């Protein structure tokens, strides 16, 4: 391509002579002295070189964003002295009984991280779950119950992650909710680690200030889980840890393809709706980590599946980060 462009950029008399005698004196003189024997100008060769350089720069500029997208975002790369870039808790397996099961958001997020080559470690609740996760190619940070603060501390100290992702929820063997205490144990362990990791906590729309916008039927069904998650949210907010809380709306099956219409909404607890799990997992890769977004609780919805009255404003949508951020 560059050879063709270079040839086309030569003056017309160069092309005629080159076609007539590729080894002629004129061509040799131009190549050797960079001065055209016919037009006595140094611009002939430099014009070709300039065209080739410009095209190369254009190709590099167009290709760079796609190359950047093929590598993990900087926020997922472990700094020097730290272990796994991301420690994940709440990764689905065959034994997962919470909505989404094996294809829950944690599992989809872990798969996308692995595909990007990020350094990740996952927490397993049983040996069977650990075997399944290892077979899927994930490093297992530990096997145990995050309701035990000693276990939570052990896995955090062993992995020294730059980021902790958690979507832990459900019930323990006695039927008690784990959404609050298990996550709080993780946050306490994170606060004790220096440097402290960034926390990404995935809860649900209906937690915190969004609870009052639920209908009574939903409150009766999901109330205990939402209140337990809200307890963990409140602890995280007061912990001093850098964090972001993501509250997805109704989650659509993880087997459904992404629509790529997911958005993050701030300061509008009244807006509800749905989002596909694949979209949410993809958005988690590019969560912003800026001073103005630290500590926010954001609603994650599909733009075509939300309910907003009054309508959503542009300034209420938080932009995802770009490659390198």
Image (cartoon, grey):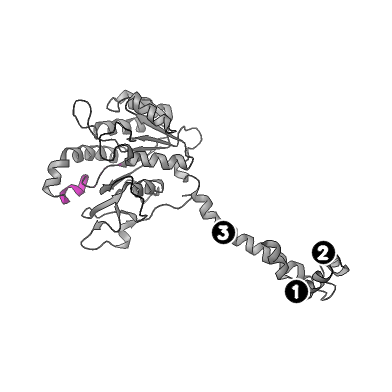
Asked whether, in this view, residue 164 is left or right of residue 9, the answer is left
Dot 1 or dot 3, earlier in sequence: 1
Asked whether, in this view, residue 105 is left or right of residue 230, the answer is right
Above or below 52: residue 134 = above
Asked whether, in this view, residue 193 is left or right of residue 276, the answer is right
The answer to whether any part of residue 107 appears in the image is: yes
Q: Residue at x 19, y 25 (%)?
A: 174
Query: What residue sits right under mark 2 in the picture?
Result: 31
Q: Residue at x 16, y 49 (%)?
A: 214
Element at label 3: helix
Do residues under tags 1 and 3 come within 8 Å of each other at their CB atoms? no
Point out residue 243 in the picture as x, y percentages from the top left corner. Answer: 34, 42
Do residues under tags 3 and 2 come within 8 Å of each other at their CB atoms? no
Instruction: Measure the alpha-carbon separation of dots 3 and 2.
Output: 30 Å
Above or below 152: residue 280 = below
Which segment is the magenta one? Answer: 202-213
- Count of labels in the image: 3
Query: What residue sits right under mark 3 in the picture?
Result: 61
| 197 inside magenta stretch | no
Name which quarter of the figure residue 225 lies in: top left
Name which quarter of the figure residue 106 lies in: top left
Circle number at residue 11: 1
Closer mark to the observer between disc 1 and disc 3: 1
Element at label 2: helix
Q: Tell me the quadrant of the picture where the N terminus can be found.
A: bottom right
Dot 1 or dot 2, earlier in sequence: 1
Instruction: Measure the alpha-carbon separation of dots 1 and 2.
Output: 14 Å
Dot 3 or dot 2, earlier in sequence: 2
């Amino acid at each position: 391509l560059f050879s063709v462009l270079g040839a086309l950029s030569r003056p017309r008399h160069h092309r005629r002579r080159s076609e007539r005698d590729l080894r002629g004196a004129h061509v040799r003189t131009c190549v050797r002295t960079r001065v055209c024997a016919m037009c006595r100008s140094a611009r002939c060769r430099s014009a070709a070189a300039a065209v080739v350089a410009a095209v190369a720069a254009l190709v590099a500029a167009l290709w760079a964003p796609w190359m950047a997208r093929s590598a993990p975002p900087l926020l997922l790369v472990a700094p020097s002295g730290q272990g796994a870039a991301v420690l994940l808790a709440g990764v689905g397996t065959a034994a997962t009984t919470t909505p989404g099961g094996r294809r829950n958001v944690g599992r989809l997020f872990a798969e996308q991280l692995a595909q990007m080559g990020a350094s990740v470690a996952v927490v397993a609740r049983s040996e069977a779950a650990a075997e399944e996760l290892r077979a899927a190619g994930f490093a297992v940070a530990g096997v145990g119950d995050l309701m035990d603060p000693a276990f939570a501390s052990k896995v955090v100290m062993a992995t020294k992650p730059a980021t902790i992702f958690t979507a832990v929820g459900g019930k323990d063997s006695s039927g008690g909710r784990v959404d609050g205490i298990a996550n709080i144990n993780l946050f306490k362990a994170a606060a004790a680690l220096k440097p402290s990791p960034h926390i990404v906590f995935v809860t649900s729309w209906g937690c915190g200030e969004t609870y009052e916008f639920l209908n009574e039927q939903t409150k009766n069904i999901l109330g205990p889980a939402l209140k337990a998650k809200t307890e963990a949210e409140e602890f995280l907010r007061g912990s001093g840890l850098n964090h972001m809380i993501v509250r997805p709306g109704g989650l659509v099956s993880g087997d459904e393809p992404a629509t790529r219409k997911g958005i993050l909404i701030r300061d509008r607890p009244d807006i509800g709706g749905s989002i596909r799990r694949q979209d949410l997992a993809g958005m988690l890769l590019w969560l912003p980590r800026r001073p103005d977004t630290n500590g926010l609780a954001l609603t994650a919805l599909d733009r075509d599946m939300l309910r907003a009255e009054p309508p959503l404003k542009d300034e209420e949508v938080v932009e995802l980060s770009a490659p390198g951020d």
